[in-house]
Amino acid sequence: MTQFEKVFRNSALHPKPVGLVLQYGTAGFRTNAKELDHIMFRMGLLAVLRSKKTKATIGVMVTASHNPEEDNGVKLVDPMGEMVTPSWEEYSMQLANAEQDVLLTALKDVIEKEAISMDQDANIFIGKDTRYRAYFHYFNTQGCYGSPTMEGYYRKLSQAFVQLTKHAPNRTDDQKHLLVDGANGVGALRLRDMERFLQNQLQISLFNDCREGKLNFQCGADYVKVQQKPPQGVEMSVGERCCSFDGDADRIVYYYKDSDGCFHLQDGDKIATLIGTFLKDMLTQAGLDLQVAVVQTAYANGSSTRYLEDVLKVTVCCTKTGVKHLHHAAQEFDIGVYFEANGHGTVLFSNAAVHKIEKLAQDSSIKNEKKRTAAQLLHSTINVINQAVGDAISDMLLVEGVLAVQGLSVQQWDAIYSDLPNRQRKIKVADRRVITTTDAERRVVTPPGLQEAVDMLVKKYPQSRAFVRPSGTEDIIRVYAEADTQENTDALAQEVCLAVYRLAGGVGEEPKPLH
């Protein structure tokens, strides 16, 4: 029996529902777990082909991230933790949606187009989250992130964090204390194991730690950001730092409560601004001429963009929504900071930037103490960052280290700039493909007249902007609006929703105001 005959026989055990079509979005395939049996089998086949092609280890991550527990998903991860290339995303959809009688033809097509040697060995790493239908995702290449074990990961990041916080002496226990919501996911399990490596430089109170409660249910980064309130089971004192991971620990958001009991969210925009400010300060003190850029999406709050460009004077570029787009854009700079507003992101350093920083940090002839310290801080910062992938634990340690070194409280961090009120809505349509966009999804190309309608509505409100974009996975159009007040923001969002409904084929009842 040939390899292809074996594949055909095994694929019959995981049949594709006739007519079902799924799209590979920015998060891979993601839907109700009951519809994913054939997808999991076929993505395993594609991962093998990708490994043979690259002659390297390929990751298969089984997770639906912040989605409800009944959902699941799968995405492929290239050797250094990045998403697979667009051409292989196309292959994934071809295989996923091929009817049973043409599956082998689709497989042979990939092999021929990519000139894959079937004699080449394949190596696959599989990670999954805590869903009952499916460990922590951690890929390591050539020891870049410590020895390739969980303990190696803990030691690598913890030692870098301890080195970073050595430059922040006399921190009190209150300054070291952090409340962490683990979303009942893998991040909670790993953080509990990691605590002993932190040498008491970070004192963690862990909530939603998988002992009770469902994954992402009334907890986690997405819940906190959308609901604008603390997760279930977390009691916050005034001014106390809190953060939430999402279910698969690749997102993080911070928050606190002020003396009036008001909730304050520090999302991905605030995190990127904090890190960008710190890196620029350290580069200036170290006398290093390296370009820092912050990569955002259209969802970034306008206040963050204005602060970065007008006050901090760093390069800001905007990409389409999706981490793969931000990651690729960040690679174009000496140092690229990217975080989506939802808290998914990291920092990338070019090889040349790493070499310059390491050389300066190890130069014993430097007499200027401020310059030497800045170089050492930059070197420790590089080591605490997981550049391969969004990693909530690594990002948490980076934020905590920066706050400690800069001597900032969470309130002082929040005061760097004030977010404009914003609102996100969604409209069901008959076919999301009727809307196409340009300018990093900030302007509509089709249907005719919709962008003109949005432009006219935006002119009615101070400091406002709005955009619409199609969902990557379902027939929904997403609407974003911001303005000077929440009342104006909600009014703008409602009017844009109506324009989308009328011009883009909305289904069901007309959208109604939120209040």
Image: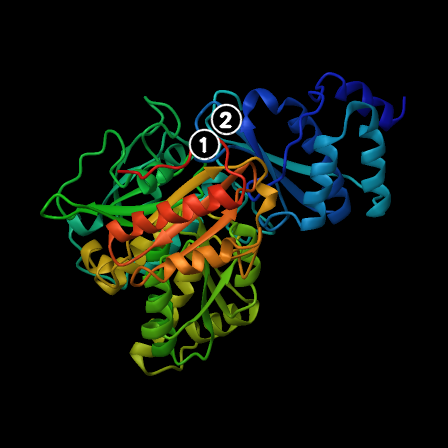
Residue 158 visible in this rendered orientation of the protein: no
Locate residue 195, reporting x and y percent: 32, 40
**Relative to 409, 29 lies left or right:** right
Q: State the quadrant of the C terminus.
A: top left
442 on left or right of 11: left
The residues tagged by marks 2 and 1 sit, at their Cα atoms, a distance apart of 6 Å
Helix, strand or loop under label 2: strand
Horizontal placement of 236 versus 225: left or right?
Answer: left
- State whether residue 215 appears in this view: yes
- The quarter of the picture where residue 325 lies is bottom right
Residue type of the residue flagged with mark 2: Asp
**Picture quarter containing residue 417?**
bottom left
- Rendered image coloring scheme: rainbow
Q: Residue 67 — which label?
A: 1
What SS does tag 1 mark? loop
Mark 2 = which residue? 71
Q: Position of residue 13 (x, y in %)?
A: 73, 16
